[in-house]
Amino acid sequence: MPDKSQTKSASGPDGTNASRNQKNSAVGDTTLPLADHIASINLNRPDKANDMNLAMWREILQAFKWVDATPEARAAILAGEVRLFTSGEDRSERVGIKEIDIGMTADVGTLQRLPKLIGEGMARELAYTVRKFDATEALQMKLVNRVFGSPEALRAGVREIAASICSKSPLSIRGVKEIITYARDHTVADGLNHVATWNAAVLLSSDRQEAMMGNMGKPEFKD
């Protein structure tokens, strides 16, 4: 079991080092504080309402690559440091699929991912009509998992979920992500074979032993 009195350090995307419990980095207009295994990727262009220009797209990609390469980061929260998350791609503050109104077909994966989340019929309607929808409808169509009553409640609720994820075995969380993603694009039979192979490889892991001993106290998993 790791000694909590010993803190690790890791390099941020800007090359700086800080402890595993508190760390702050930045990539252009994106700040990257890391605390308690939770990385917060904050969009920070307040003068432009966090519009998604090309530079910010690249910064977000770089930030998530850093999270993926940093063992101390077990969960990531993507948020905006202004009153809204983002105003879109330098065009509008409205919520909707707007590309068709500027003579384009929606890109960056919208038409590939959205039908699998909300169904093909609703995805077609939103893409064809460019109509706006609010948080209540987003919840009804299962585009979001839940809706909070205020920005403060949102931040607290999301951080609570992230903290819960971080308390679990990192290897098991990685496995769940892998298996769900694999199952999305494969048959049930293929998915069952894949999870059987995965579990066979991790049965003797230290994470499993730590989890099995969890009823004797709070488990502490290695990064």
Image (cartoon, rainbow, N blue to C red):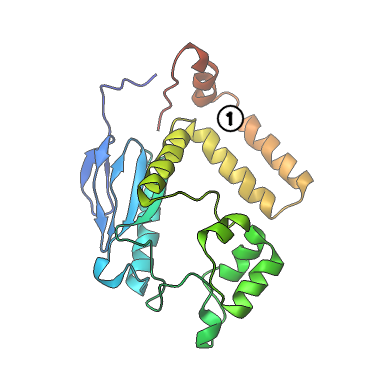
For the residue pair 25 and 143, the one nearer the viewer reads as: 143
Q: Is residue 150 left or right of residue 113?
A: left
Residue in the picture at 53% in, 19% down: 209
State the image coordinates of residue 80 (x, y, percent, origin top left).
34, 58
| Disc 1 target residue | 202
Q: Quadrant of residue 70?
A: top left
Viewport quadrant of the N terminus: top left
Residue in the picture at 35% in, 74% down: 53
For the residue pair 169 and 38, the one nearer the viewer reads as: 38
State the image coordinates of residue 99 (x, y, percent, origin top left).
52, 80
Q: Quadrant of residue 123?
A: bottom right
Give the crowd class for mark 1: few <14, some 14-19, many >=20 residues within 10 Å.
some
Q: Is residue 94 left or right of residue 144?
A: left
Using the image, determine if residue 127 lies above or below residue 64.
Answer: below
Viewport quadrant of the C terminus: top left
Per the image, label 1 sits on a secondary structure element best described as helix
Q: Report the residue that reaches farthest toward the top.
A: 216
Q: Report the residue that reaches farthest toward the front.
A: 149
State the image coordinates of residue 24 (x, y, percent, origin top left).
23, 47
Q: Quadrant of residue 139?
A: bottom right
Q: Report the residue that reaches farthest toward the bottom.
A: 103
Using the image, determine if residue 211 lies above or below residue 91.
Answer: above
Give the amino acid at mark 1: Val
Q: How many marks?
A: 1
Using the image, determine if residue 155 lies above or below residue 114.
Answer: above
For the residue pair 18 and 105, the one nearer the viewer reads as: 105
State the image coordinates of residue 148 (x, y, percent, origin top left).
46, 49
Q: Is residue 142 left or right of residue 21?
A: right
